[in-house]
Image (cartoon, rainbow, N blue to C red):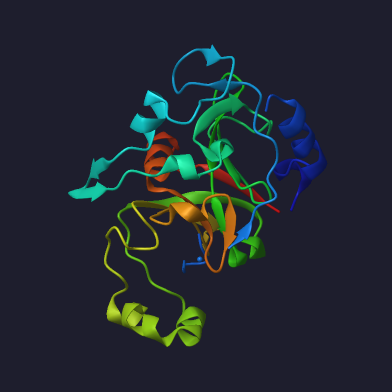
Amino acid sequence: MPSSDHFSRRAFLSLSAVGAASLLAGCASSRPAGGYAASTITYRDGASPVGQPMTRGSAELNAMYGEVYDGGRVIPAVPYTQIDPRYYRQRVVDPTGQPPGTIVVDTPSRFLYLVELGGTAMRYGVGIGREGFAWQGTGVIQWRQKWPKWTPPEDMIRRRPELAKYSADNGGMPPGLDNPLGARALYIFQNGEDTLYRLHGSPEWQSIGKAVSSGCVRLLNQDIIDLYERVPNKARVLVWQ
């Protein structure tokens, strides 16, 4: 990948430590993530900086990860106290150096950044499928979908014949709370072609911060809804290992 489209892993990790801080069309579930230290300066969403990270049990987190009514469906509240706090959605000092509007997926640390104006970024915890490590590079969000269908790829169907009922020939799996793509999906294209790599929601909150058995980059449904509303059209995406 050209150096102009890629910041060095060493520099990124240094900034992450010091700087105060999809799936290939198929998803399914884990080994713990290595992860890096959370930012030492966090920001409340849309407010002034605060001196310490959000704490479990706060009213802010209860609202952020509470029950959501969306598109005629009720998304259950996330038991966020069972998730490592560093994976909570939060605004941090941008460690990427990328232009505003860029999405950066840091697969080793299980973070997704949406770079903002003013030197900050929204950071989301993600889960990564094994296939998620098979693609890296620069792409663009070419297509966005609310409550998408899910169509498992043929190689997944060969491994799991019970998924044949959701094949492309059978119209895929309808949208819904149990759909592996969750409430939203962002489709990454490169050079005008679908990479089959997605950023998407997931009902499996246990997978955040972990590498799961199959799939791509998954976020909590509450987080993918938030990201979907923030990300600009045709956003540039960097995915690196």
Q: Which residue lies at the image location 46% right of the left edge and 39% below the top edge?
A: 81
Q: Is residue 187 visible?
A: no
Front-most of 57 and 74? 57
Front-most of 193 and 152? 152
Q: Which residue lies at the image location 69% right of the left edge and 35% below the top edge?
A: 37
Q: Which residue lies at the image location 30% right of the left edge and 55% below the top edge?
A: 147
* Residue 103 point in image, percent of width and height: 56, 41
* Residue 206 point in image, percent of width and height: 48, 54
State left or right for residue 177 relative to residue 159: left
Q: Is residue 172 above or below residue 38?
A: below
Residue at the limit of the structure toward the top, as seen here = 48
* Residue 63 point in image, percent of width and height: 34, 30
State left or right for residue 3 relative to residue 109: right
Tell me where residue 40 sits by quadrant. top right
Q: Is residue 228 above or below residue 166?
A: above
Q: Is residue 120 visible?
A: yes
Front-most of 64 and 102? 64
* Residue 107 point in image, percent of width and height: 64, 51
